[in-house]
Image: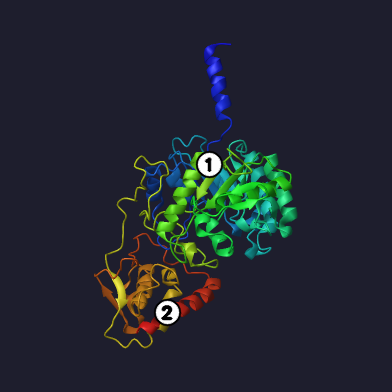
Amino acid sequence: MPPNLCLILLLCISTSKTRATAIGLNWGTAASHPLPPPKVVELLKNNNVARVKLFDADPLVLQALSGSKIAVTVGIPNSMLRSLNSSKKAAESWVHDNVTRYFSNSGRGSGVRIEYVAVGDESFLQSYGDQFHPFVIGAATNIQTALMRANLAGEVKVVVPCSSDTIQSESNLPSKGHFRSDLNKTMTQLLTFLNKHHSPFFVSISPFLSLHQNKNISLDFSLFKENAHPHRDSHRTYKNSFDLIYDTVVTALSTAGYPEMDIVVGQIGWPTDGAANATSSIAETFMKGLITHLQSKSGTPLKPRVPPTETYIFSLLDEDQRSIAAGNFERHWGLFTFDGQAKYHVDLGQVSRNLVNAQNVDYLSPKWCVVNNNQDLSNATAIALEACSAADCTALSPGSSCFNLSWPANISYAFNSYYQQHDQQAASCGFGGLGLITTVDPSTEKCRFSIQLRTSRSSSIYPPSLLHWMLSAIATILVCLQQFQ
Protein backbone atom coordinates (compact mmCIF):
# COMPACT_ATOMS: atom_id res chain seq x y z
CA MET A 1 0.00 0.00 0.00
CA PRO A 2 1.42 3.45 -0.91
CA PRO A 3 2.68 5.43 2.16
CA ASN A 4 0.43 8.39 1.39
CA LEU A 5 -2.66 6.16 1.33
CA CYS A 6 -1.63 4.60 4.66
CA LEU A 7 -1.38 8.05 6.19
CA ILE A 8 -4.81 9.03 4.89
CA LEU A 9 -6.39 5.86 6.28
CA LEU A 10 -4.75 6.38 9.66
CA LEU A 11 -6.05 9.93 9.81
CA CYS A 12 -9.56 8.77 8.92
CA ILE A 13 -9.46 6.08 11.61
CA SER A 14 -8.12 8.41 14.30
CA THR A 15 -10.68 11.14 13.61
CA SER A 16 -13.69 8.84 13.27
CA LYS A 17 -13.86 8.40 17.04
CA THR A 18 -14.95 11.99 17.56
CA ARG A 19 -17.26 14.31 15.72
CA ALA A 20 -16.91 18.05 15.37
CA THR A 21 -19.83 20.13 16.61
CA ALA A 22 -20.96 23.32 14.89
CA ILE A 23 -22.13 26.29 16.95
CA GLY A 24 -24.65 28.78 15.63
CA LEU A 25 -27.01 31.45 16.97
CA ASN A 26 -30.77 31.95 17.05
CA TRP A 27 -31.77 35.28 15.53
CA GLY A 28 -35.19 36.40 16.70
CA THR A 29 -36.88 39.62 15.57
CA ALA A 30 -39.57 40.16 18.23
CA ALA A 31 -38.34 43.68 18.97
CA SER A 32 -40.11 47.04 18.89
CA HIS A 33 -37.01 48.70 17.40
CA PRO A 34 -34.98 45.95 15.74
CA LEU A 35 -31.39 46.40 14.72
CA PRO A 36 -31.48 46.65 10.90
CA PRO A 37 -30.85 43.24 9.27
CA PRO A 38 -27.73 44.38 7.36
CA LYS A 39 -26.27 45.56 10.67
CA VAL A 40 -27.09 42.19 12.28
CA VAL A 41 -25.43 40.26 9.44
CA GLU A 42 -22.37 42.47 9.85
CA LEU A 43 -22.43 41.63 13.57
CA LEU A 44 -22.62 37.91 12.79
CA LYS A 45 -19.74 38.07 10.33
CA ASN A 46 -17.55 40.16 12.63
CA ASN A 47 -17.98 37.47 15.27
CA ASN A 48 -17.32 34.60 12.84
CA VAL A 49 -20.79 33.13 13.32
CA ALA A 50 -21.19 30.54 10.56
CA ARG A 51 -24.75 29.36 11.25
CA VAL A 52 -27.96 31.13 12.15
CA LYS A 53 -31.46 29.89 12.94
CA LEU A 54 -34.46 32.10 12.13
CA PHE A 55 -38.00 31.87 13.49
CA ASP A 56 -39.64 33.09 10.30
CA ALA A 57 -38.73 34.05 6.74
CA ASP A 58 -38.57 37.84 6.87
CA PRO A 59 -37.63 39.04 3.34
CA LEU A 60 -35.44 41.84 4.73
CA VAL A 61 -33.51 39.33 6.84
CA LEU A 62 -33.06 36.89 3.95
CA GLN A 63 -31.97 39.68 1.65
CA ALA A 64 -29.39 40.79 4.22
CA LEU A 65 -28.07 37.20 4.48
CA SER A 66 -27.65 36.90 0.71
CA GLY A 67 -24.04 36.30 -0.21
CA SER A 68 -22.93 36.07 3.43
CA LYS A 69 -22.10 32.32 3.22
CA ILE A 70 -23.81 31.91 6.63
CA ALA A 71 -25.71 28.62 6.86
CA VAL A 72 -29.37 29.43 7.51
CA THR A 73 -32.34 27.66 9.07
CA VAL A 74 -35.52 29.35 7.85
CA GLY A 75 -38.48 29.14 10.23
CA ILE A 76 -42.21 28.65 9.74
CA PRO A 77 -44.24 30.28 12.56
CA ASN A 78 -46.80 28.22 14.45
CA SER A 79 -49.56 30.47 13.10
CA MET A 80 -48.98 29.05 9.60
CA LEU A 81 -49.09 25.36 10.49
CA ARG A 82 -52.83 24.88 10.01
CA SER A 83 -52.87 26.27 6.47
CA LEU A 84 -49.70 24.41 5.43
CA ASN A 85 -51.15 21.19 6.81
CA SER A 86 -54.36 21.53 4.83
CA SER A 87 -53.01 22.83 1.54
CA LYS A 88 -50.19 21.48 -0.63
CA LYS A 89 -50.56 24.57 -2.80
CA ALA A 90 -49.92 26.81 0.24
CA ALA A 91 -46.79 24.79 1.00
CA GLU A 92 -45.57 25.12 -2.59
CA SER A 93 -46.16 28.87 -2.49
CA TRP A 94 -44.29 29.17 0.80
CA VAL A 95 -41.29 27.21 -0.51
CA HIS A 96 -41.23 29.26 -3.71
CA ASP A 97 -41.42 32.59 -1.88
CA ASN A 98 -39.07 31.81 1.01
CA VAL A 99 -36.65 29.14 -0.18
CA THR A 100 -36.43 28.89 -3.97
CA ARG A 101 -36.32 32.67 -4.38
CA TYR A 102 -33.24 33.02 -2.16
CA PHE A 103 -31.53 29.63 -2.26
CA SER A 104 -27.88 29.05 -3.04
CA ASN A 105 -26.15 25.85 -1.92
CA SER A 106 -22.86 27.71 -1.56
CA GLY A 107 -24.13 31.08 -0.37
CA ARG A 108 -22.20 32.77 -3.15
CA GLY A 109 -23.39 35.68 -5.19
CA SER A 110 -26.85 36.86 -4.25
CA GLY A 111 -28.00 33.55 -2.78
CA VAL A 112 -28.69 32.40 0.77
CA ARG A 113 -27.17 29.16 2.00
CA ILE A 114 -30.40 27.63 3.32
CA GLU A 115 -29.82 24.24 5.01
CA TYR A 116 -33.01 23.64 6.98
CA VAL A 117 -36.67 24.61 7.02
CA ALA A 118 -37.88 24.52 10.63
CA VAL A 119 -41.59 23.71 10.73
CA GLY A 120 -43.10 25.45 13.75
CA ASP A 121 -41.46 26.95 16.83
CA GLU A 122 -41.64 24.52 19.75
CA SER A 123 -45.20 23.72 18.73
CA PHE A 124 -45.32 20.78 21.16
CA LEU A 125 -45.04 23.02 24.24
CA GLN A 126 -47.33 21.60 26.89
CA SER A 127 -48.81 25.04 27.56
CA TYR A 128 -50.06 25.16 23.94
CA GLY A 129 -52.23 22.09 24.38
CA ASP A 130 -53.65 20.98 21.01
CA GLN A 131 -53.36 24.43 19.48
CA PHE A 132 -50.58 23.56 17.03
CA HIS A 133 -49.25 20.01 17.24
CA PRO A 134 -52.08 18.28 15.30
CA PHE A 135 -50.92 20.19 12.20
CA VAL A 136 -47.14 19.72 12.46
CA ILE A 137 -46.71 16.41 10.63
CA GLY A 138 -49.01 17.36 7.76
CA ALA A 139 -47.29 20.73 7.38
CA ALA A 140 -43.83 19.11 7.42
CA THR A 141 -44.92 16.52 4.86
CA ASN A 142 -46.32 19.15 2.52
CA ILE A 143 -43.19 21.30 2.82
CA GLN A 144 -41.05 18.23 2.05
CA THR A 145 -43.15 17.50 -1.03
CA ALA A 146 -42.86 21.13 -2.14
CA LEU A 147 -39.06 21.00 -1.75
CA MET A 148 -38.97 17.83 -3.85
CA ARG A 149 -40.99 19.51 -6.61
CA ALA A 150 -38.59 22.44 -6.50
CA ASN A 151 -35.62 20.03 -6.78
CA LEU A 152 -34.31 21.23 -3.42
CA ALA A 153 -35.01 18.18 -1.23
CA GLY A 154 -31.41 17.03 -1.60
CA GLU A 155 -30.11 20.38 -0.40
CA VAL A 156 -32.61 21.54 2.23
CA LYS A 157 -33.83 19.34 5.09
CA VAL A 158 -37.15 19.71 6.88
CA VAL A 159 -36.91 19.68 10.68
CA VAL A 160 -39.33 20.23 13.57
CA PRO A 161 -37.98 22.11 16.62
CA CYS A 162 -39.17 20.40 19.81
CA SER A 163 -39.51 22.07 23.20
CA SER A 164 -37.67 20.75 26.24
CA ASP A 165 -40.94 19.56 27.81
CA THR A 166 -41.56 17.24 24.85
CA ILE A 167 -39.42 14.77 26.80
CA GLN A 168 -39.99 13.79 30.42
CA SER A 169 -38.41 11.70 33.16
CA GLU A 170 -40.42 11.33 36.34
CA SER A 171 -37.32 10.38 38.30
CA ASN A 172 -35.17 13.06 36.61
CA LEU A 173 -32.83 10.26 35.51
CA PRO A 174 -31.68 10.05 31.87
CA SER A 175 -32.33 6.30 31.82
CA LYS A 176 -36.04 6.98 32.41
CA GLY A 177 -36.41 9.52 29.62
CA HIS A 178 -39.47 9.23 27.35
CA PHE A 179 -41.69 11.36 25.15
CA ARG A 180 -44.80 12.87 26.73
CA SER A 181 -47.65 10.37 26.63
CA ASP A 182 -50.00 12.81 24.90
CA LEU A 183 -47.47 13.06 22.04
CA ASN A 184 -46.77 9.35 21.51
CA LYS A 185 -48.59 9.08 18.19
CA THR A 186 -47.29 12.42 16.91
CA MET A 187 -43.69 11.64 17.91
CA THR A 188 -43.86 8.24 16.21
CA GLN A 189 -44.97 9.96 13.01
CA LEU A 190 -42.33 12.69 13.38
CA LEU A 191 -39.42 10.33 13.99
CA THR A 192 -40.52 8.14 11.06
CA PHE A 193 -40.58 11.24 8.86
CA LEU A 194 -37.18 12.51 10.04
CA ASN A 195 -35.57 9.09 9.65
CA LYS A 196 -36.98 8.64 6.14
CA HIS A 197 -35.50 11.94 4.98
CA HIS A 198 -32.25 11.67 6.99
CA SER A 199 -33.10 14.80 9.00
CA PRO A 200 -31.86 15.41 12.56
CA PHE A 201 -33.96 15.75 15.69
CA PHE A 202 -34.08 19.41 16.79
CA VAL A 203 -34.66 19.93 20.53
CA SER A 204 -34.34 22.75 23.03
CA ILE A 205 -32.25 22.16 26.14
CA SER A 206 -32.61 24.59 29.05
CA PRO A 207 -30.41 24.13 32.11
CA PHE A 208 -31.76 27.51 33.30
CA LEU A 209 -35.37 26.30 33.37
CA SER A 210 -34.27 22.99 34.85
CA LEU A 211 -32.57 24.88 37.69
CA HIS A 212 -35.76 26.80 38.46
CA GLN A 213 -38.07 23.80 38.16
CA ASN A 214 -36.03 21.10 39.89
CA LYS A 215 -34.93 21.60 43.49
CA ASN A 216 -32.37 18.78 43.11
CA ILE A 217 -30.40 20.72 40.48
CA SER A 218 -27.81 23.14 41.84
CA LEU A 219 -26.49 26.30 40.21
CA ASP A 220 -22.94 24.87 40.14
CA PHE A 221 -24.22 21.73 38.39
CA SER A 222 -25.95 23.94 35.79
CA LEU A 223 -22.80 26.01 35.21
CA PHE A 224 -20.38 23.14 34.49
CA LYS A 225 -18.52 23.82 37.75
CA GLU A 226 -15.94 21.15 38.58
CA ASN A 227 -16.89 21.18 42.26
CA ALA A 228 -20.59 20.53 41.52
CA HIS A 229 -22.15 17.55 43.27
CA PRO A 230 -22.54 14.85 40.59
CA HIS A 231 -25.76 13.00 39.79
CA ARG A 232 -25.65 9.25 39.35
CA ASP A 233 -27.87 7.13 37.15
CA SER A 234 -27.01 3.48 37.73
CA HIS A 235 -23.31 3.18 36.80
CA ARG A 236 -23.24 6.49 34.93
CA THR A 237 -22.09 9.73 36.53
CA TYR A 238 -23.33 13.13 35.40
CA LYS A 239 -21.23 16.20 36.17
CA ASN A 240 -23.44 18.87 34.60
CA SER A 241 -27.04 19.62 33.74
CA PHE A 242 -26.46 19.69 29.98
CA ASP A 243 -25.31 16.06 29.83
CA LEU A 244 -28.17 15.00 32.10
CA ILE A 245 -30.82 16.59 29.87
CA TYR A 246 -29.12 15.56 26.62
CA ASP A 247 -28.96 11.90 27.63
CA THR A 248 -32.63 12.04 28.61
CA VAL A 249 -33.28 12.96 24.96
CA VAL A 250 -30.98 10.15 23.81
CA THR A 251 -32.91 7.63 25.91
CA ALA A 252 -36.27 8.85 24.60
CA LEU A 253 -35.07 8.46 21.01
CA SER A 254 -33.59 5.03 21.73
CA THR A 255 -36.79 3.83 23.40
CA ALA A 256 -38.73 5.01 20.35
CA GLY A 257 -36.43 2.97 18.11
CA TYR A 258 -34.01 5.64 16.84
CA PRO A 259 -30.82 5.36 18.92
CA GLU A 260 -28.56 6.66 16.14
CA MET A 261 -30.62 9.65 15.02
CA ASP A 262 -28.54 12.85 14.90
CA ILE A 263 -29.47 15.43 17.52
CA VAL A 264 -29.31 19.18 17.01
CA VAL A 265 -29.68 21.41 20.05
CA GLY A 266 -31.98 24.02 18.54
CA GLN A 267 -31.98 26.36 21.53
CA ILE A 268 -29.77 26.65 24.59
CA GLY A 269 -28.78 29.72 26.55
CA TRP A 270 -28.91 31.66 29.80
CA PRO A 271 -30.83 34.92 30.36
CA THR A 272 -29.20 37.98 31.88
CA ASP A 273 -32.17 39.70 33.53
CA GLY A 274 -35.77 39.22 34.61
CA ALA A 275 -35.32 36.50 37.27
CA ALA A 276 -33.15 35.21 40.08
CA ASN A 277 -29.79 33.86 38.81
CA ALA A 278 -30.34 35.70 35.51
CA THR A 279 -27.29 37.96 35.37
CA SER A 280 -24.57 38.67 32.84
CA SER A 281 -21.86 37.18 35.04
CA ILE A 282 -23.74 33.90 35.56
CA ALA A 283 -24.64 33.76 31.85
CA GLU A 284 -20.98 34.23 30.96
CA THR A 285 -19.95 31.37 33.23
CA PHE A 286 -22.59 29.11 31.71
CA MET A 287 -21.76 30.01 28.13
CA LYS A 288 -18.02 29.54 28.58
CA GLY A 289 -18.64 26.19 30.25
CA LEU A 290 -20.99 25.07 27.48
CA ILE A 291 -18.69 26.02 24.61
CA THR A 292 -15.66 24.48 26.29
CA HIS A 293 -17.65 21.28 26.81
CA LEU A 294 -18.86 21.19 23.20
CA GLN A 295 -15.44 21.95 21.75
CA SER A 296 -13.83 19.22 23.87
CA LYS A 297 -15.93 16.73 21.82
CA SER A 298 -16.14 14.57 24.94
CA GLY A 299 -19.82 13.88 24.41
CA THR A 300 -22.00 12.54 27.24
CA PRO A 301 -22.09 9.31 29.27
CA LEU A 302 -24.54 7.75 26.78
CA LYS A 303 -22.86 9.30 23.73
CA PRO A 304 -19.13 9.48 24.50
CA ARG A 305 -17.14 11.42 21.89
CA VAL A 306 -20.39 12.13 20.01
CA PRO A 307 -21.45 15.73 20.73
CA PRO A 308 -24.58 17.25 19.15
CA THR A 309 -24.33 17.63 15.39
CA GLU A 310 -25.04 21.33 15.78
CA THR A 311 -25.84 23.62 18.71
CA TYR A 312 -27.67 26.94 18.40
CA ILE A 313 -27.20 29.47 21.20
CA PHE A 314 -30.33 31.26 22.30
CA SER A 315 -30.04 33.96 21.44
CA LEU A 316 -28.28 36.66 19.46
CA LEU A 317 -30.13 39.79 20.68
CA ASP A 318 -32.56 40.77 23.42
CA GLU A 319 -36.16 41.08 22.18
CA ASP A 320 -38.51 43.41 24.05
CA GLN A 321 -41.66 41.96 22.48
CA ARG A 322 -41.14 38.28 23.23
CA SER A 323 -43.95 36.67 25.17
CA ILE A 324 -43.33 36.78 28.92
CA ALA A 325 -45.86 34.08 29.72
CA ALA A 326 -43.01 31.86 30.96
CA GLY A 327 -41.32 34.70 32.85
CA ASN A 328 -39.79 38.15 32.50
CA PHE A 329 -36.43 36.58 31.63
CA GLU A 330 -37.81 35.72 28.17
CA ARG A 331 -36.82 39.17 26.92
CA HIS A 332 -33.22 38.91 28.07
CA TRP A 333 -31.66 35.84 26.41
CA GLY A 334 -29.32 37.76 24.10
CA LEU A 335 -25.55 37.51 24.01
CA PHE A 336 -25.96 41.11 22.90
CA THR A 337 -28.32 43.84 24.05
CA PHE A 338 -31.06 44.96 21.66
CA ASP A 339 -28.59 47.40 20.09
CA GLY A 340 -25.87 44.83 19.44
CA GLN A 341 -23.59 45.54 22.40
CA ALA A 342 -21.97 42.49 24.03
CA LYS A 343 -23.15 41.80 27.58
CA TYR A 344 -20.12 39.65 28.31
CA HIS A 345 -17.33 37.95 26.45
CA VAL A 346 -17.24 34.41 25.17
CA ASP A 347 -15.19 32.66 22.49
CA LEU A 348 -17.33 31.87 19.45
CA GLY A 349 -14.26 31.54 17.27
CA GLN A 350 -13.36 35.23 17.06
CA VAL A 351 -9.69 36.04 16.65
CA SER A 352 -9.83 38.36 19.67
CA ARG A 353 -11.81 35.81 21.74
CA ASN A 354 -14.02 38.76 22.71
CA LEU A 355 -17.36 39.49 21.14
CA VAL A 356 -17.32 42.37 18.67
CA ASN A 357 -20.05 45.00 19.14
CA ALA A 358 -22.31 46.33 16.41
CA GLN A 359 -20.77 49.45 14.90
CA ASN A 360 -22.30 52.81 13.97
CA VAL A 361 -25.66 52.05 15.55
CA ASP A 362 -28.27 54.73 14.82
CA TYR A 363 -29.93 55.77 18.10
CA LEU A 364 -32.68 58.26 18.82
CA SER A 365 -31.62 61.52 20.47
CA PRO A 366 -29.82 61.29 23.87
CA LYS A 367 -32.83 62.17 26.01
CA TRP A 368 -35.00 60.38 28.52
CA CYS A 369 -38.40 60.76 30.15
CA VAL A 370 -38.39 60.86 33.96
CA VAL A 371 -40.86 61.71 36.67
CA ASN A 372 -41.27 65.39 37.58
CA ASN A 373 -40.64 65.48 41.32
CA ASN A 374 -42.24 68.92 41.59
CA GLN A 375 -45.68 67.49 40.83
CA ASP A 376 -48.19 65.64 43.00
CA LEU A 377 -47.13 62.00 42.62
CA SER A 378 -50.00 60.40 44.53
CA ASN A 379 -51.29 58.81 41.32
CA ALA A 380 -47.86 58.09 39.79
CA THR A 381 -47.88 54.34 40.47
CA ALA A 382 -51.17 53.79 38.65
CA ILE A 383 -49.97 55.83 35.68
CA ALA A 384 -46.67 53.94 35.57
CA LEU A 385 -48.60 50.69 35.64
CA GLU A 386 -50.53 51.79 32.58
CA ALA A 387 -47.27 52.77 30.85
CA CYS A 388 -45.75 49.34 31.52
CA SER A 389 -48.73 47.63 29.88
CA ALA A 390 -47.53 49.09 26.56
CA ALA A 391 -43.77 49.00 27.15
CA ASP A 392 -41.08 46.70 28.55
CA CYS A 393 -40.69 46.92 32.33
CA THR A 394 -39.35 43.42 32.88
CA ALA A 395 -36.12 44.77 34.40
CA LEU A 396 -38.20 46.03 37.36
CA SER A 397 -39.30 42.53 38.38
CA PRO A 398 -37.96 40.87 41.56
CA GLY A 399 -34.34 39.78 41.23
CA SER A 400 -33.84 41.91 38.10
CA SER A 401 -31.31 44.66 37.37
CA CYS A 402 -33.66 47.56 38.17
CA PHE A 403 -35.64 45.98 41.01
CA ASN A 404 -33.72 47.90 43.65
CA LEU A 405 -34.58 51.31 42.22
CA SER A 406 -36.26 53.31 44.94
CA TRP A 407 -39.57 55.11 44.46
CA PRO A 408 -40.01 57.26 42.36
CA ALA A 409 -36.94 56.24 40.29
CA ASN A 410 -38.82 53.10 39.31
CA ILE A 411 -41.64 55.32 38.07
CA SER A 412 -39.10 57.14 35.90
CA TYR A 413 -37.97 53.80 34.47
CA ALA A 414 -41.55 52.96 33.47
CA PHE A 415 -42.07 56.41 31.96
CA ASN A 416 -38.84 56.20 29.95
CA SER A 417 -39.58 52.72 28.68
CA TYR A 418 -42.91 53.96 27.30
CA TYR A 419 -41.31 57.12 25.91
CA GLN A 420 -38.59 55.21 24.04
CA GLN A 421 -41.09 52.62 22.82
CA HIS A 422 -43.01 55.47 21.20
CA ASP A 423 -40.00 57.01 19.45
CA GLN A 424 -39.49 59.83 21.98
CA GLN A 425 -42.62 61.62 20.85
CA ALA A 426 -43.19 64.58 23.19
CA ALA A 427 -46.76 63.48 23.88
CA SER A 428 -45.51 60.09 25.10
CA CYS A 429 -43.83 61.80 28.07
CA GLY A 430 -47.00 63.55 29.24
CA PHE A 431 -48.42 61.21 31.87
CA GLY A 432 -50.89 63.82 33.06
CA GLY A 433 -48.13 66.35 33.65
CA LEU A 434 -45.96 63.95 35.66
CA GLY A 435 -43.40 63.34 32.88
CA LEU A 436 -40.32 65.44 32.27
CA ILE A 437 -37.92 65.17 29.31
CA THR A 438 -34.26 65.39 30.32
CA THR A 439 -30.85 65.14 28.64
CA VAL A 440 -29.25 63.88 31.88
CA ASP A 441 -28.89 60.09 31.79
CA PRO A 442 -30.79 58.66 34.80
CA SER A 443 -29.13 55.24 34.53
CA THR A 444 -27.49 53.74 37.62
CA GLU A 445 -24.55 51.34 37.88
CA LYS A 446 -26.83 48.31 37.58
CA CYS A 447 -29.90 49.72 35.86
CA ARG A 448 -29.76 51.04 32.30
CA PHE A 449 -32.33 53.55 31.10
CA SER A 450 -32.20 52.76 27.38
CA ILE A 451 -32.33 55.01 24.36
CA GLN A 452 -34.07 53.22 21.52
CA LEU A 453 -32.89 52.73 17.95
CA ARG A 454 -34.10 54.98 15.18
CA THR A 455 -35.54 52.00 13.28
CA SER A 456 -39.03 51.49 14.65
CA ARG A 457 -41.83 49.00 14.83
CA SER A 458 -43.45 50.94 17.64
CA SER A 459 -46.90 50.43 16.16
CA SER A 460 -46.71 46.83 17.39
CA ILE A 461 -48.82 46.33 20.50
CA TYR A 462 -48.47 43.50 22.96
CA PRO A 463 -51.15 40.82 22.52
CA PRO A 464 -54.13 41.31 24.86
CA SER A 465 -53.50 37.88 26.38
CA LEU A 466 -50.25 39.21 27.86
CA LEU A 467 -51.63 42.43 29.29
CA HIS A 468 -53.35 40.88 32.31
CA TRP A 469 -50.14 39.13 33.34
CA MET A 470 -48.08 42.27 32.78
CA LEU A 471 -50.50 44.48 34.69
CA SER A 472 -50.61 42.23 37.74
CA ALA A 473 -46.86 41.64 37.77
CA ILE A 474 -45.87 45.29 37.39
CA ALA A 475 -48.55 46.38 39.86
CA THR A 476 -46.99 44.16 42.51
CA ILE A 477 -43.53 45.53 41.76
CA LEU A 478 -44.52 49.17 41.83
CA VAL A 479 -46.73 48.91 44.90
CA CYS A 480 -43.96 47.14 46.80
CA LEU A 481 -41.40 49.74 45.80
CA GLN A 482 -43.73 52.59 46.76
CA GLN A 483 -42.76 51.93 50.38
CA PHE A 484 -39.60 53.95 49.64
CA GLN A 485 -41.64 57.15 49.20
Q: Residue 31 carries which label?
A: none
Q: Residue at x 46, y 51 (%)?
A: 287
Earlier in the chain: of badge 2 and badge 1, it is 1
Give percent across and percent down for residue 44: 41, 46
Asked whether residue 86 is in view, the answer is no
- Residue that label 1 marks: 114
- Residue with the most extreme left position: 439
Between disc 2 and disc 1, the foreground one is 2
Q: Where is residue 301 in the image (x, y as percent from the top left)?
A: 61, 44
How many marks the image carries: the answer is 2
Image point 26% across, 65% down: which residue?
366
Residue 440 location, x and y as percent?
24, 70
Q: Provide residue 40's location: percent of width, then percent of height.
A: 40, 50
Identify the residue shown where x is 34% and y is 42%: 352
* Image disc number at residue 478: 2
Q: In this view, does 413 lie above or below 231?
A: below
Look at the numbered disc 1 and give the secondary structure of its residue: strand
Identify the amino acid type marked 1: Ile
Seen from the viewer's position, the closer of residues 396 and 44 is 396
Q: In this view, does 156 lie above or below 424?
A: above
Judge whether residue 39 can be spotted in this image: yes
